[in-house]
Amino acid sequence: MKKAFWNLSIVCSVLVLPFLSATSAFADIQEEKQEETEALTSLDENSVLDFNKIESGTAQAPTEETAQNPSDTSTIDETPVTSVSQFSDVAPTDWAFQALQSLVERYGCIAGYPNRTYRGNRALTRYEFAAGLNSCLEQATKLIASSTSNLVTKQDLDTIQRLNQEFQPELAQLRGRIDNLEQKVAEVKASQFSATTKLTGEVQFVVGGVFAGNNVITKQPAPRTITFADRVRLVLSSSFSGKDQLRLTLSGGNITTLGGVPNPRGNFSNPLSSSNPTGGIFGTFDGRTADNASPAFGANQLALGGIRYRFPLSDNTQFNVFAQSDGALEIGLSGPTNPFFEGSAANGISRFSRRNMVYNYGDTGPGIAILHKFNKQFELGVSYSAPNGDNPTPNNGLFTGRYVAFGQLTYFSPSRDFRFALSYANTYSPPGTLGQGGTNFGPAAGSNLANSTISTNLQNAANGIVDKGTVGNLYGIGAFYKLSPKFAVNGFVGYSSHRFLEHGDADVWNWGVGLSFPDLGKEGSLGGLFVGMAPKLTSLSRNVDLGAGRGQADKDTSLHVEGWYQYQLTDSIAITPGFIWITAPNSDESNPDAVIGWLRTTFRF
């Protein structure tokens, strides 16, 4: 009789508890399995900043809502409360107050949410009810083992026996689903790349060529040769705390730039510097395609192109330190104000359509970058990078050589459909120092003069004209407005003041306008049209010679017109046909228009 009484007294805790703690029990089970599964996922590399789990290795990219409301979570607090008064949303006037008080203070089986709420009006599924019932049966077993007495009436026992029988099928199904989930998690763990590292990749196949245009240096027609080239990019992302990220980027390819490479024939008879961008098929940066192979490495040579560690300084501040990267890249480049053209292995075909020139004066190297969110509308990014910071020779190094100090203030409307950014960069390049991109100074887009420094040829040297280094102060404005879910417009204007030390000054301008058509023809596809003026040297001090003669700036205005359609064949494969049309290449109307055709297929994995 005594043993039956003990069983009866313990089982009473299940009488009301399933109705009140089922949600908690079910959430605990689901959360435990979800954590095991999500621990295998890493971050979306393109996500710049999540102020609660910055590129967390244990969670997928958060939604904007969860990022802005970190306290609003459905996770259940695992520590049971000891008094009903600990729930901020439970009042003595609530109709179930006495029942809840009994379960909390008499049986100790209730758990609430981390913010000390109970949410008693939340809807309950039969599966959740079954999970709560199972949880309370386990609690009953614990109470029996502890020899607790005088807790239950016979009516309680009769009721719980009926409930146990009624929900027996749901309990069995729930156990089966948990067993299946455990098996799947075990399979994923056994076959995963790494317990802490995620591998993502991009592969490009590009068929393209020149359909019209001349080399602006030789004035001869550019070769009308169709090529088939490739580019590969592999990213290894690791997290050690769940809030940090170590990222390694391996890349290689053989997509040859059509212009804007150093001219190996700079000499006395050719007054163009050997370090100025007059080589290549076109002999100018105008019409340069994006995602070209780096001139610092051989064709299809896989090289380590990025090493960066990122971690949060606070809930609102993200810190990046990199041994090989670009500071503007680490705080988002033009992504916030040009999201449909900016992107690796996708979107805009040319380098110019992807971003304002203010972002392009740097090159790969070491540095730091900080992104701080003031509130939901404003964020500030600052960075310092030294493209030749790993070089110990004179005129190089982290603080004594080439550098770019960059800052950007960005505004987001509450709906994020409108965005506006103000950018500034200060940069310095000593004479004769080339980065991995093959340039010494300039935006790596537009005319040759806009990318040139004092010519270091024999003729200038004989006249005592020697490059002393170049300083740039760059100013940019960018805006984006999404007028509807299927149409958006963006634009930018950039101004750069070049100072050729001990010689004189120059002014460079560029602007661009883009139209984007999300989900054009198919969900996930994207169309784009772009027109702009690539960087153009508009004025130059009378005593400065950049290769075209003293005081000679660009004579004419060149327009860059680009169109493309990115068809999303599957979630992982996109096909993008497009074209680039350049009027008056190299800002010289004596040069015939240039036309480039491009067909890009992108694979992501």
Image (cartoon, rainbow, N blue to C red):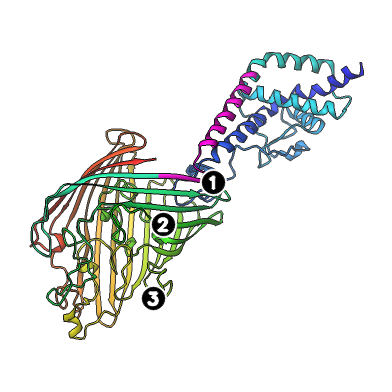
Crowding at label 3, few (<14), some or many (≥20) Cα neighbours within 10 Å?
few
Kindly identify the residue that appears in the image at 43 percent across and 64 percent down.
366
What's the amino acid at mark 1? Thr
What's the amino acid at mark 3? Thr
Which of the 4 image quadrants contains residue 138?
top right
User: Is 216 or 314 nearer to us in this picture?
Assistant: 216
Q: Is residue 527 left or right of residue 83?
A: left
Question: Does 58 sit above or below residue 122?
Answer: below
Q: CA distance from mark 3 to mark 2?
A: 22 Å
Which residues are drawn in magenta? 172-200
Q: CA distance from mark 2 to mark 1?
A: 19 Å
* Residues at marks 3 and 2 touching, judged by CB atoms closer than 8 Å: no
Residue 34: image tag: none
Residue 306: image tag: 2
User: Is 588 or 99 nearer to us in this picture?
Assistant: 588
Select label 3 or label 2 by which is in front: 3
What's the amino acid at mark 2? Gly
Which of the 4 image quadrants contains residue 185?
top right
Q: Earlier in the sequence, mark 1 or mark 3?
A: 1
- Give the residue at mark 3: 393
* Residues at marks 2 and 1 touching, judged by CB atoms closer than 8 Å: no
The answer to if 176 sits in the magenta stretch is yes
Q: Earlier in the sequence, mark 2 or mark 1?
A: 1
- Give the residue at mark 1: 196
Residue 475 in the image, given as x and y percentages of width and height = 33, 65
User: Is 30 or 477 nearer to us in this picture?
Assistant: 30
Question: Does 173 sit above or below residue 267?
Answer: above
Callout 2: helix, strand or loop? strand
Disc tally is 3
The answer to if 85 sits in the magenta stretch is no
